[in-house]
Amino acid sequence: QVQVVESGGDLVQAGGSLSLSCVASGAIFSINSMGWYRQAPGKQRELVAISNRGGDTNYGDSVKGRFTVAKDNAKNTLTLRMNNLKLEDTAVYYCNALVVRRAGGQTFSYWGQGTQVTVST
């Protein structure tokens, strides 16, 4: 099996910074991509940032210029650094990994349980 675990969620003031960490572990042959998504109450889950194995990264429009990700392929980790946080960044943040479990095998999508980020005034 494969586990995806997020950590780092917290309560932070607007304008502040926070880092979230994600690690994938278990029966992993390779990871095609890892990404962060978020879901605010009453809203659909949206892309925050996604990084593929080659290092290409795409960001959601609402976080461009404020959030950055760092991916460690050897450790299967993805760190999200969030700067200049806004009230609208309040959400549950989820990590996703697209995992190949054996050589030549198909890709499976795994999600973490989520970590709460709350931005206050």
Image (cartoon, rainbow, N blue to C red):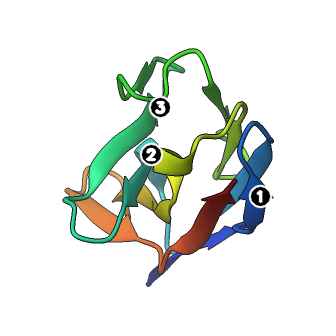
Q: Is residue 43 left or right of residue 3?
A: left
The residue drawn where x is 46% and y is 47% is: 88
Q: Is residue 43 left or right of residue 95?
A: left
Q: Label 3 sits on what residue type?
A: Ser
The residue drawn where x is 36% and y is 29% is: 60
Residue topped by disc 2 = 35
Specify the label residue 51 is tagged with: 3
Task: Give residue 69's position: percent from left, percent from top.
Answer: 63, 32
Q: Label 1 sits on what residue type?
A: Val
Which tag is nearer the camera, tag 1 or tag 3?
A: 1
**Around disc 1, counting alpha carbons within 10 Å, would you say few (fewer than 14), some (14 to 19), or many (20 or more)?**
some
Task: Give residue 63's position: percent from left, percent from top.
Answer: 49, 28
Specify the label residue 12 is tagged with: 1
| Alpha carbon separation for disc pair 2 and 1 | 22 Å
Residue nearest the viewer, comparing 95 with 11: 11
Q: Is residue 115 left or right of residue 28?
A: right
Residue nearest the viewer, comparing 36 with 34: 36
Specify the label residue 77 is tagged with: none
Task: Give residue 72's position: percent from left, percent from top.
Answer: 71, 39
Residue nearest the viewer, comparing 50 with 52: 50
Would residue 25 be visible to someone looking at this image?
A: no
| Alpha carbon separation for disc pair 1 and 3 | 25 Å
Q: Is residue 64 left or right of residue 61?
A: right
Of pointers 2 and 1, the one earlier in the residue sequence: 1
The residue drawn where x is 61% and y is 64% is: 117
The residue drawn where x is 73% and y is 32% is: 83
In the structure shown, which secondary structural element does the residue marked by tag 1 occupy? strand
In the structure shown, which secondary structural element does the residue marked by tag 3 occupy? strand
Instruction: Classify 104 as above or below 93.
Output: above
